[in-house]
Amino acid sequence: VEQLNLYYTEEYRRMDLEREFSDKLQTKTRITVTRNRSNLLSVHKEGNDQVHLRVQEIFLRAPQPVWEAIGTFIVSPSTKTRRIIRDFISQNRPADALKKSGRTLKLTTQGVYYQLDSIYQALNSEYFNGEVKCHISWGKPYLKKRKRSISFGNYDGFSNLIKINPSLDHPKVPDYFIRYIVYHEMLHAKLENVLKQKTVRRAHHPVEFCESEKKFLEYEKAIAWEKKYIRLFIK
Ligand SMILES: [Zn+2]
């Protein structure tokens, strides 16, 4: 056993975790280990059948309960799993990242044409009774020139943050389209909270999501605009 342990490198640990997670979540799980000092853990759902987990290397030495919490967190984030993960991070934070702690989210809502915060506030009172509570920010611009697909927005449950693609801050983008993108991500934020008690794995856009999405008054218009103009963003 002693000798085997010598060969149990971090890479083996990573592969074991990938297998364990793919089994447990019944979803192909990819784990990337990073040395990122500000973003220690992030989960990306890639379609409905793949999960990509980026973890800082401190997590390779995390005890089993922490990994169990991460597994539960992916399926249904709850206050309890968040706390277990946060506690582990605060006790194991890479030394020179301490200065940055709490400063990791740099939110910018003011664009040149659109102001995300006022869009968010207006949608929140118009559609959500003011009940959505999350952060919103412009994301970083894409550096790569060519891309095959584009994501106009995303919601990350771990940081409770909506990020909107800054290429939408453009005079040619109609306001109903950007409002639709923000509305869509706010629905994710809302459902994350509603569904967090359920333990069953759920689709990224479950039926109730799609029904709520159509309540957005300019839904048809926004979808039509997206179909017509998406190529401008992709080429
Ligand atoms: Zn979505």
Image: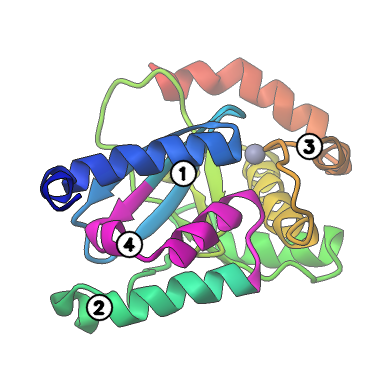
Q: Which mark is residue 40?
A: 4
Where is ligand 1, by quadrant? top right
| Occupied quadrant, residue 30 | top left
Reading the chain from its start, which is encountered first: label 1 or label 4? 4
Residue that carries the numbered disc 3 in the rendered image: 206
Residue 137 sits inside the magenta stretch: no
Q: What amino acid type is highlighted by mark number 2?
A: Lys
Q: Is residue 168 visible?
A: yes
* Most foreground residue, 148 or 97: 97
Q: Which residue type does callout 4 highlight?
A: Leu
Nearest to the observer: residue 211 or residue 89? 89
228 left or right of 113? right
Cα distance in 3D space between marks 3 and 1: 23 Å
Q: Mark 3 or 1, which is nearer the eye?
A: 3
Residue range corresponding to the magenta coloring = 54-79
Rounded to the nearest angstrom, the CA distance separating label 2 from label 1 is 25 Å
Residue tagged by mark 1?
165
- Label 2 and label 3: CA atoms lie apart by 37 Å
**Is tag 2's residue or tag 1's residue first in the polypeptide sequence?**
2
Tag nearer the camera, 2 or 1: 2
